[in-house]
Image (cartoon, rainbow, N blue to C red):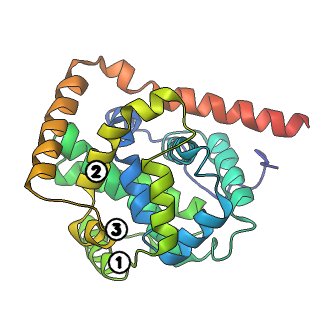
Amino acid sequence: MPDPHRASRPTAGRVQDPDLRRFLADSTPVAAGGRAILLQIADPVVAAGVRCHSDFARRPQQRLAHTLMFVYAVVIGTEADAAVAAGFVGRAHRPVTGADDPDRQLWVAATLYDSAMRAHTLFGDPVDASRARSVLDAYAPIGTALRVPADRWPGTVEAFEWYWASALERLEVTDDARGVVRDLLHPRFAPLWVRAVMPVVRIVTVGMLPEVVRTQYGFAWGPREQRRFRRTVRWVRVVRGLLPRGLLRLPGPLLLRSMHRTADRYLSN
């Protein structure tokens, strides 16, 4: 049962800089959610845990929603938000072998930061070096919320890039990962609206993957797919540019509200 009064392992607090808070609350990284999951399960231990303990086949969109909920709670939420989110994660990880391995959890946290930055660069506004460093610091509590020692999180963007390059070399896509990908990108039991947007989700997700990982998954990727990806990126950029900024920041509060409703149900049972 998530305990909002538990001594707060995550020391997230609230980001004080209002401009940075607006940037972190922007929902543009949602477009890279599938990419982050595919990168996470390219680690064989993570893939085995997800395959055995997640209901991907019936609710593939749920893991994405829970991942985004966790990020919003820890990065821009209150201490109470972060504690509730960490409680849910701890409960979900309890039966999973290797779930508390700091190396694996560091990788999971790193995929969230890298995917967010890629999404902003691809679909939104350019991210300069100063903003990249600020976001890197803001994402550090994700690692500690996942029980990664604070000193393991890269302290500079250059250190992160070095870690990222070396981590990519150690990935190995297994049959467990491929099974999860089938459920994620070709959901059989998802709501109709989810299945309707999956063609766009698939081209964006596969197109955003590092080439070495895309090749390991065995995705077809040639000139035709590249052209579709570029067209889709242009379309997403246009749509995003037309949306009010307040609407782009709406998913965060909605997800946090949903998280607290779920926590209240646990506490009342």
Residue 172 can be seen in this image? yes
Residue occupied by mark 2? 117
224 sits to left or right of 96: left
User: Mark 3 belongs to which amino acid?
Assistant: Tyr
Of 39 and 153, which appears nearest the observer?
A: 39
Q: Nearer the viewer, mark 1 or mark 3?
A: 3
Total numbered labels: 3
Element at badge 1? Answer: helix
User: Residue drawn at (45%, 42%), measured in percent from left and top?
Assistant: 15
Residue 150 can be seen in this image? no
Measured along the vertical axis of the image, is residue 108 above or below residue 83?
Answer: below
Q: Residue 36 appears in which quarter of the rendering?
A: bottom left
In 3D space, how far apart are the residues under numbered discs 1 and 3 (Cα atoms)? 17 Å
Of 53 and 187, which appears nearest the observer?
A: 187
Q: Residue 133 appears in which quarter of the rendering?
A: bottom left
Indicate which disc residue 13 carries.
none
User: Mark 2 belongs to which amino acid?
Assistant: Met
Measured along the vertical axis of the image, is residue 66 above or below residue 44?
Answer: above
Residue occupied by mark 1? 167
Element at badge 2? Answer: helix
In 3D space, how far apart are the residues under numbered discs 1 and 2 (Cα atoms)? 17 Å
Crowd tier of the residue under label 3, counting other residues whose Cα lies within 10 Å: few below 14, some 14–19, many 20 or above: some
N-term-proximal mark, 3 vs 2: 2
Q: Position of residue 47 (x, y in %)?
A: 53, 69
User: Residue drawn at (38%, 38%), measured in percent from left and top?
Assistant: 198
42 sits to left or right of 239: right
Residue occupied by mark 3? 217
N-term-proximal mark, 1 vs 3: 1
Q: Are marks 1 and 3 in contact (CB under 8 Å)?
A: no
Of 227 and 88, which appears nearest the observer?
A: 227
